[in-house]
Image (cartoon, grey):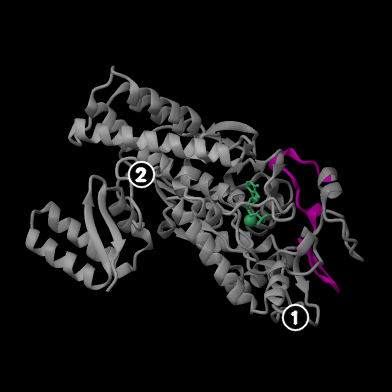
Amino acid sequence: MQWLARIFGNKKNTTHERPPQIFFTNTLSGRKEVFVPQRAGIVTMYTCGPTVYSKQHIGNLRPGMLSDTIARTLASAGYRVRRVINITDVGHLVGDGDHGDDKVAVSAAREKVTPKSLADRYTKEFINDLSELNIAVGDIQFPHATDYIKEQIAFAKTLEEKGFAYPLPSGLYFDTQRFPGYGKLGGVSAAELAAGARVDVVAGKRHSADFVLWRTAKPNDLQQWDSPWGRGNPGWHIECSTMSRALLGKEIDIHTGGEDLAPIHHNNEIAQSEAASGRTFAHYWLHNAFLTMSGEKISKSLGNVVYLSDVIEKGFDPLALRYFFLQAHYRTPLSFSWDALAGAASALERLQRLAQDVAQESKHKESPSEARGHFLAAMRDDLATPQALGILWDALRSEEYAPAEKWGLLQDADAHLGLSLLAPAGPGALAVADLPGEVQEMLARREAARVSRDFTEADRLRGEIERRGYRVDDGPNGPVVTRTTL
Ligand code: AMP
Ligand code: ZN
């Protein structure tokens, strides 16, 4: 009953049972390490999210896939995972410099809407895309940078008071030379960072790698606030240090994002957070490689973008894209083409058909098997999804395994890979996490009633849910909810 655990939290984790070993490649050490959380049974994970000045392309969804795969693997091993994906709606500048125009403000002006309505629209589309990929968005907090202005100012003030920041007319800057080990993530030297740092020349900057914490407003800035350094807006990096601390604490277990963020954005996050707290900011750093097309990174600036809406318009199940992502290890660049996606879609359909046969043959009875052990070992070995898929295919096609063993393996496969193999959702099926809280609660109560064989109460609750515009059908993996027209 994974969906119930999603609503009420995974209660499975305990300090009595030793969780299985899980290994991740940590960008901080450059090595594969065994994962040990700070608190038994609980994991905190922060993922750098999108800048919501335009629609997100399918490359932008790869970081979401990485953090989802981490979360599923940890949750299946008994951990409760607390997750944040931030929404950047201020501070990320055109050209990535410290003093260009704000991306959100530029797009808002072009589309003649307020920055807030622009950001809200693209945030909603992004979260919807994640949900289409079977990512349980109800389990994730999505804080907006503009909702944490006071906290960002307080954070920058702390850094100034501790001597890690200095003011200039153009803003407050972080002094990278005051922070020992600056650039430790990915083993980038300070000289390389300086060379790669923004090429905007700022009068008075002590070192070229120094970066802005709070930027002095230009008179026409659409988004600006009062601060101890005058009217202005936050630098891009400070939001992640601030929101991560506010929502997950000073020290977090896992931090993830696209590999392009490691050298500057993530090194700057580390510098800010560790300078302020004197503690380790994040213990494990995981980065996904790029999604490419015809040999180039899919990127808005190159203009070679494909959106999830294009995938759906062409008649593909969004889970075909999920399958496509899982075919590659997260640290490997992945090349997108429509043919490759079609290949993934047909593989997924074949897998779903195999799963349906297993459902019938096994009568939903499950038992352990060697294949399950191998599958779990692959997932727990730095999320080896291509190997895990291979193990799944081999076992389902093999005559060596009994139907109940295959059914058991499918339980693990669905929990880790999220391909809805046990209960193909069918058209219109909604993720439980996306339903209104009241309906989620009724669903949970109805399930409890069914389990205790109180079918009168279960039927009453079904009626209540229907009156709210939703239809419930019972699938092998929990209820399948669709929208009805009232
Ligand atoms: P951006 O909107 O470019 O700041 O990107 C938002 C997130 O998506 C960051 O974590 C990037 O690293 C990631 N990202 C952007 N383009 C790609 C791509 N082609 N493949 C994988 N990740 C990407
Ligand atoms: Zn970030």
Relative to the observer, which residue lies in front, 262 or 160? Answer: 262
- Badge 2: few (under 14), some or many (20 or more) residues near its Cα, within 10 Å? many
What percent of the width, then of the height, locates residue 75? 39, 44
**Quadrant occupied by the C terminus:** bottom left
Q: Which residues are magenta?
A: 163-190
Rounded to the nearest angstrom, the CA distance separating label 1 from label 2 is 50 Å
Image position of 211 with respect to 401: above or below: below
Q: Which residue is mark 2?
A: 420
Q: Amino acid at mark 2?
A: Ser
Q: Quadrant of residue 352?
A: top left
Image position of 205 with respect to 329: above or below: below
Q: Which residue is mark 1?
A: 231
Is residue 401 shown to the viewer in this render? Answer: yes
Q: Which residue does the image show at 51% across and 63% down from the upper left?
A: 142
Q: Dot 1: what SS?
A: loop
What percent of the width, then of the height, locates residue 397? 34, 23
Q: Which residue does the image show at 87% across and 60% down from the upper left?
A: 200
Q: Which residue does the image show at 26% across and 32% down from the upper left?
A: 357
Q: Dot 2: what SS?
A: loop
What percent of the width, then of the height, locates residue 169? 86, 74
Q: Is residue 189 magenta?
A: yes
Horizontal relation, residue 300 to residue 288: left or right: right
